[in-house]
Image (cartoon, rainbow, N blue to C red):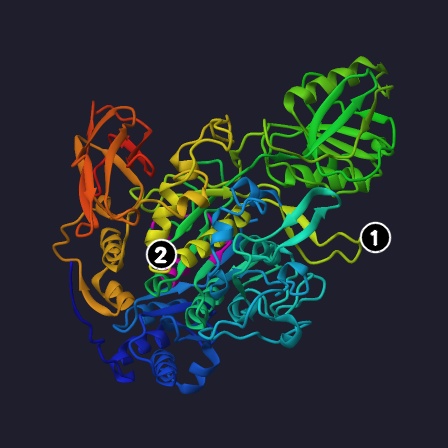
Amino acid sequence: MRSVPFEPKKYTPASVFTLVLLLILHEGAVAKTKVYVVHLGRRQHEDLDLLTRTHHELLTSVLGSDEASEDSMIYSYKHGFSGFAAKLTETQAKVMSELPAVASVIPNYLYKLQTTRSWDYLGFALDFPTDVLHESTLAHNLTIGLFDGGIWPESEVFNDKGLGPIPSRWKGTCDPGEFFDPVRACNRKLIGARHYVKGLEAEYVKPLNTSGHGEYLSPRDGSGHGTHASTIAGGSITPGASFHGLGFGTVRGGAPSARLAMYKVCWNVLGGVCATADVLKAFDDAIQDGVDVISLSLAPEIPSFSDVDKRSPILFGSFHAVLEGIVVVCAGGNDGPSSQTVQNAAPWVITVAASSMDRSFPTTISLGNNQTIMGQGHYTGKDVGFLSLVYPEVSDLNEPRYCSSLSESDVSWLVGKVVLCFTSESGVDAITYPGSSVKEAGGLGLIVAKRPTASSYSCGNSFPCVQVSYEFGFQILSYIRSTRFTDYFYSSKSIISPSQTRVGKPLPANVAYFSSRGPNSIAPAILKPDIAAPGVKILAAVPPDEKSSTTNTSFRFLSGTSMATPHISGIVALLKSLHPEWSPAAIKSAVITTARTTGLYGEPLYAEGDPMKLADPFDFGGGIVDPNRAADPGLVYDMGESDYIDYLCAMSYNDSSISRLRGHRTSCLGYPGSILDINLPSISIPHLEGSATLRRTVTNVGPINSTYNAVVQSPPGVTTSVEPDTLTFNAEIKEISFRLMVSAVSQVYTGYGFGSLTWTDGVHSVRSPIAVQVGGEEFYD
């Protein structure tokens, strides 16, 4: 790869006259328009007014008039990068994409939001003053920017007690809007709040009607998702938090002294969506505002083709942010447990999986035969004594009745009773839909038998709703059938007791059922996800429930990679404060190479699925994050712009697109490198035939004089060796390169096997996960 100064080609309206003529010939005046993002790449100068004029001129050259350009323009991106969003027909978008000044044209896709004990579980105990949380005294100078669904500024978790003045380098603003007064809403904790809706309104919702949606045309949070994520990342220390008594304790963010800035790009309509054009404008502003970390708890739909990667706004929005030293943390998605579902897979971002932790909410079911069954629930009501227990029988007594059918038949028979049903689903709908059906029909409780996972869901704290395993479900069913006197009369009884909170041993942590899995479908040689963090039943702040008769309703349990992502964002903010000289890649390396591959108590980590299995790097990347170890990793795998350009070349981006993205003329001609050699802290080799040699470079960030030895755990079916296998650092030698040779034992096509490479000096263990698939077509050379 070679780089020379880049001079953009000139364009005039006349230069595209022929192309514009094609528009007239092929489209009528009423042709349907959609919103497209026109990405022009890196900003070439600091004159913002000139950039805006340039964007309008380029749009005018295609549309034919200044008036049409003004009507079409949605956003002008001019801070973090150059580009604009505009309403175009499909043909106009094609013409625009062929102009020499344009790097790419991207349709206005919709993204989805990916929806206390967790910090204690990760080692941030308030009563243990030797961990990273207490060492990090500089976090008050850092700002975490969250791209999410807004924030509820009145929540106590956003109080600014003990915080000094807003950092002088902060350039952001606090936008006014519906039920959002900037003077009252923002303070020294919440220092910025913006909202973006033009991209959504221009194509999908015209205009956005907030009435009836629990939504606000302002940075205010209508769904609770953004408030919840903000609490996890950087909420202030707030004692006495619980969900109606469950999970009682102190809520705080990972970086409680950090400042927060909300960029509301997601809206509580169409199931909760975020438009591409709005996300890109948030990137543009956040880079200019001066955030240090960007946390995105959102992801696109599962990709079908690698071209989706080239069209991703997060791909190039995060690229520009990382080049400015901003760490970008993204949700890996909630489409697990199927393989190849992980999202936000660019090598310069940190992609997060979700795990459970050592907390559960056991709920006792007492049957009329004195048998006790233990399930999981969030029931905080009263013990109302024995109630009739029924099961909706079908003609075949061996066939379990599925919960989904409860809403499809006459349910008058369940009035005043507790209902047992079975489900093969594992998502939230498997619980909430039958729960609503039973409750609306006058039922008094629900027991759902399902496959065992940590991802239990609530029917509401006041309605008895318990989840049990299939085994326990059949035990309850056997009891019900044993008490049947006729086809229509049962004497079975049950009591559902209020849920309790249990933490610590022997509760294991697992990779959550819903957490999206690798391998990376876009670039299999880039191992994703990168890291796992708690994302199951996380207690954090949400907007108050005005309909509730209780006072403690501003906290709620939510699950998703949306909850795991801000855990990593808070940790990243602490690491930046401790090591301000570290690059985003160095921070990413520290997080991955120090992660735990066993549970907190040494137990093996499992990945929930069909069936449950031992977790591997495609489930959790490097493992479950260990923030205290990440603060002192010993060695890091650093990367810079050249590594990222190598990735783009390997992914067949053309020279023009890369030149625009980078702001320098770049050629991939004669590209000698391999995507396997990108200096990542993880290793993935798809379709290994024969052997492969990978190159990596590590940088010493520990003691100046140190020696590390290699320990290799080879994946099944391959042999591995390292040269050199000993690395010695001193005052003069801070970086050392090495080679990892991987050879297939046979050429029999196999699935992926997993291993690791660990560099250790007796104190630090710098572990890189390895994934190798033997056989198949060789495509990475």
- Which of pointers 2 and 1 lies earlier in the amino acid sequence? 1
**Is residue 410 among the parts visible in the rendering?**
no
Residue at image position (33%, 57%) is 583
- Residue annotated with mark 1: 549
Is residue 145 left or right of 245 when viewed as pictured?
A: left
Q: Which type of secondary structure does the marked residue at label 2 adopt? A: helix
- Residue annotated with mark 2: 584
What's under tag 1, amino acid-wise? Ser
Magenta residues (range): 295-318
Q: Residue 389's spot in the image, x, y percent?
A: 82, 25
Q: Residue 177's spot in the image, x, y percent?
A: 63, 74
Q: Which type of secondary structure does the marked residue at label 1 adopt? A: loop
Residue count near mark 1 (Cα–Cα under 10 Å), binned few <14, some 14–19, many ≥20: few
Find residue 599 and name its label.
Answer: none
Q: Residue 372's spot in the image, x, y percent?
A: 76, 20
Depicted 588 relative to depicted 68: above or below: above
> Residue 47 versus residue 728: which sits nearer the camera?
728
Depicted 738 relative to depicted 362: above or below: below
Count of marks, rendered view: 2
Rendered-image quadrant of the N terminus: bottom left
> Residue 272 versus residue 349: which sits nearer the camera?
349
Alpha carbons under labels 2 and 1: distance apart: 46 Å
- Hey, which quadrant is residue 576 in on the image? bottom left
Rendered-image quadrant of the C terminus: top left
Residue count near mark 2 (Cα–Cα under 10 Å), binned few <14, some 14–19, many ≥20: many
Depicted 533 relative to depicted 717: above or below: below
What's under tag 2, amino acid-wise? Pro
Does the segment drawn in magenta span residue 296?
A: yes
